[in-house]
Amino acid sequence: MPKEEKTEEKPKEEAVQKKEAVPEVKKTAASKLLKGKNWYTIVSPALFGEKPLGEALAADPSALPGRKITASLMELTGDPSRYYMTMRFMISEVNGTVAKTVFDGHECTRDFAARIVQRFTQRIDTNGVLQLKDGRIRVKAIAICNRHVTNIVAKAVRRKLEEMIAAATAEKTMDDFITMFTSGELQAAIRGEVSRIYPLRAFEFNKTEVL
């Protein structure tokens, strides 16, 4: 009888691949980069609960003030309905390893504007500088009418928006204004009043910038 040929079984390949060792040159370069520098935790203003926003690396803490960082309003407040607002903060001071921030402005995402501006509607924009009790801020707002309107109606709506925004923020602090617009309270009040001139489909503060 013919002899059965023996087949050698190849060893099974290991399922987990070994990680390649990091060259000592890279480790040394990274060590030199971090040498003499410290990590600082950036936190939101007290109005937003002083929540951690991120970290910054610096050799001298005096170099941190002026740096800016952004965060989603939804993450700060836990309100999913405000998902489209991005808040901007600026580092104002450093205490130990904590970098404190102040409000520097905000902006709505582009997809938000694209969603509310639909066919047969009309967009009306306002752009003005408000004088608050403790600072100045540029405010850009957007209103959407249910239908296309005449120039006379558009001017009346824009004038009413500007009047109400100025009146609502008169004698208010920066924190007062931030609280009113991040909660949506101010937008709802303005939309209800202006809709007496012409029904608004939406009204929002599209962008702000502390001056």
Image (cartoon, rainbow, N blue to C red):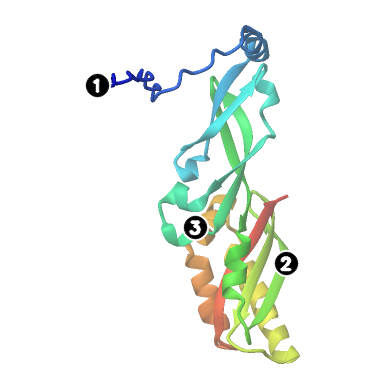
- Give the vertical position of 114 relative to 198 (above or below): above
Question: Are circles 3 and 2 on residues that touch, CB within 8 Å?
Answer: no
Classify mark 3: helix, strand or loop. loop
The x and y percentages for residue 154 are: 70, 85
Residue that carries the numbered disc 3 in the rendered image:
83
**Residue at which label 1 appears:** 1
- Taking 211 as reference, is 116 above or below it? below
> Which image quarter holds the N terminus?
top left
- Is 39 situated above or below 198? above
Instruction: Pinpoint residue 34: horizontal percent, then vertical percent.
Output: 63, 14
Residue type (three-letter) at the residue carrying disc 3: Tyr
Q: Where is residue 179 in the image (x, y as percent from the top left)?
A: 50, 55
Along the viewing direction, whichever of 159 and 204 lies nearer the viewer: 204
Q: Residue type at mark 1?
A: Met
Of marks 3 and 2, the one in the foreground:
3
Q: Are marks 3 and 1 in contact (CB under 8 Å)?
A: no
